Image (cartoon, helix red, strand yellow):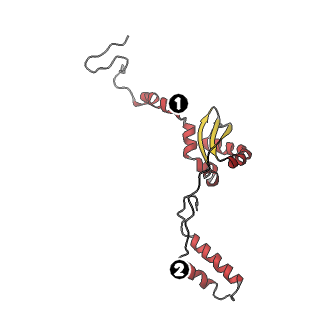
Amino acid sequence: MAVKDTDSGMTTDDRHVYGPRPLSALVPRLTRPAFRRRAPATAQVLADWSAIVGPAIAAVTTPRRVSAGTLTIACAGPIAMELQYLSAELIGRINAHLGSQTVAALRFVQTAALPLPPLPIQTTPADVTAAADQAVAGLPDGELRAALAALGRAVLARRKPSTHPAIKQ
């Protein structure tokens, strides 16, 4: 029977017999409702999705939840067909990342394709153009020189980091 202490407003069940309760005794009571809503495996998959499947697949898919060993992935219709063929490899990657056999199957839900933001128009800086033209200055005019100059501009311009979110270098 719980007896209410009038000074503190606590019942005898709320207090620890030997003094203050250790913090570790309170953690399960606090985390259980959160883990019921979203399991730790789901949170790990959501947080590391791009690292698990790679940037190309991560750009067109979104993991939704892990329930009873099935990972639900949202993607566009055509992507789902391709991912069905890759499902064994994806399951292997996910389980290797989690360190246990958490995911046994994949379920695909069709969503509208998320359009990527348009690539910004990149202008080649003058110093890059000058360096590429100087590198091919000794070659005779023609298609080969123009192609090598274009290649030099592309290589020199790529050394600068891209600002587009879909392009990782």
Which quadrant is home to the N terminus?
top left
- 66 vs 25: above or below: below
Residue drawn at (68%, 79%), measured in percent from left and top?
A: 147
- 56 vs 147: above or below: above
- Estimate the spatial distance between the alpha carbons at disc 2 and disc 1, rounded to whole Å: 58 Å
Say which element carries label 2: helix
- 119 vs 96: above or below: below
Could you say which is closer to the camera, residue 25 or residue 151?
Answer: 151
Residue 105 position by quadrant? top right
Residue drawn at (53%, 79%), measured in percent from left and top?
A: 126
Say which element carries label 1: helix
Could you say which is closer to the camera, residue 26 or residue 45?
Answer: 45
Identify the mark nearer the N-term, 2 or 1.
Answer: 1
Residue 131: x, y in percent? 57, 81
Residue 25 position by quadrant? top left
Residue drawn at (63%, 87%), measured in percent from left and top?
A: 137
Give the labeled residue for mark 2. 127
Give the labeled residue for mark 1. 36
For this orientation, the residue located farthest to the front is 112
Which quadrant is home to the C terminus?
bottom right
Callout 1 amino acid: Arg
Check whether the beta carbons of the residues at disc 2 and disc 1 lie within 8 A of each other. Answer: no
